[in-house]
Amino acid sequence: MADRPPFRTFGRTRSRRLKPRRAALFDDLLPELAIPTEPFDPRLLGLATEEIWLEIGFGAGEHLAAAARARPDVMLLGAETFIDGVGSLLRYVEGLALQNVRIHAGDARDLMANLPPGSIDRLFVLFPDPWPKARHRKRRLVQTSFVLEAARILKPRARARIATDWADYAESILVELLSSPDFAWTAAAADDWRIAPADHFPTRYQTRQLGDCPPIWLDFKRI
């Protein structure tokens, strides 16, 4: 994705002022958890784990932290541009004493570009920026270039979950993924995309009903 447009977010990337405790976590804890900004092998980040999962745009970190707590045998990589969200995840990491979380505070596409092929076992993109206006939809994350890069970093038979509460975004995601020779949609019945998967960890965002439809859950398998 070297020719991608500059990153732009639908919302803010930082609050007016971080609370003192979260600011201290940026100074003290984030350097220990920061993901390298050059090409790297996630297996060499110091954790002996069975799998490596990546969450793109982890928001307040609720899902990522819950997954890390439930699966200490898995390394969770997370990327988020919203500084308050990074601070929130740092608070979870400290409060829950999580050892299997690593953080990229910036554009997830930079992180993806630095990952080696076939290095990720699961990918989560939960409620990405919707950019609902038609003239802004080219700024949405899930485009052809993103799908190609996701296919590159995912292992064969790895799983990818994308959720959105905007109907036309769900439709465009399906068009992109079903057009790819690298992915298969795993849904067998309507409830597979209408009902949150059993292994999903809920977040406050999904209960706020900010989109134009109930959450749509799209699970894919890397062919």
Image (spheres, rainbow, N blue to C red):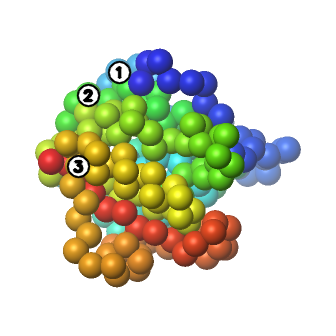
Q: Which three-letter amino acid code belongs to the residue tagged 1?
A: Pro
Which label sits in the foreground, 2 or 3? 3
Q: Horizontal and vertical percent for residue 186?
A: 23, 65
Name the secondary structure under disc 3: strand
Q: What secondary structure is marked by label 2?
A: loop
Q: Which of marks 1 and 3 is in front?
A: 3
**Residue 183: which numbered mark, if any?**
3
Mark 2 residue crowding within 10 angstroms, few (<14) / some (14–19) / many (20+): some
Q: How far apart are marks 2 and 1 (CA)?
A: 7 Å
- Name the side, left or right, on which 146 lies relative to 82: left
Q: The N terminus appears in which quarter of the rendering?
A: top left
Mark 1 and mark 3 lie on one chain; the one further toward the N terminus is 1
The reply to whether callout 2 and callout 1 are in contact (CB within 8 Å) is: yes
Q: Please provide percent x and percent y for residue 132.
A: 65, 52
Of the residues under marks 2 and 1, which one precedes in the sequence? Answer: 1
Q: Nearer the viewer, residue 93 or 170?
A: 170
Read off the residue under disc 2.
116
- Residue at which label 1 appears: 39
Q: Could you say which is closer to the camera, residue 208 or residue 201?
A: 208
Tell me the number on the disc at residue 201. none
Q: Which three-letter amino acid code belongs to the residue tagged 3? A: Phe
User: Which residue is situated farthest in the right direction here?
Assistant: 16
For image coordinates 45% across by 44% down, the residue present is 142
Q: How crowded is mark 3: few (under 14 residues within 10 Å), some or many (20 or more)?
A: many
Residue sitting nearer the eye, 12 or 162: 162
The disc, 2 or 3, on the residue closer to the chain's N-terminal end is 2
Estimate the spatial distance between the alpha carbons at disc 1 and disc 3, rounded to whole Å: 25 Å
- Whether tag 2 and tag 3 are in contact, CB under 8 A, the answer is no
* Residue 218 in sight here: yes
Please name the residue shown 53% across and 48% down the image: 57
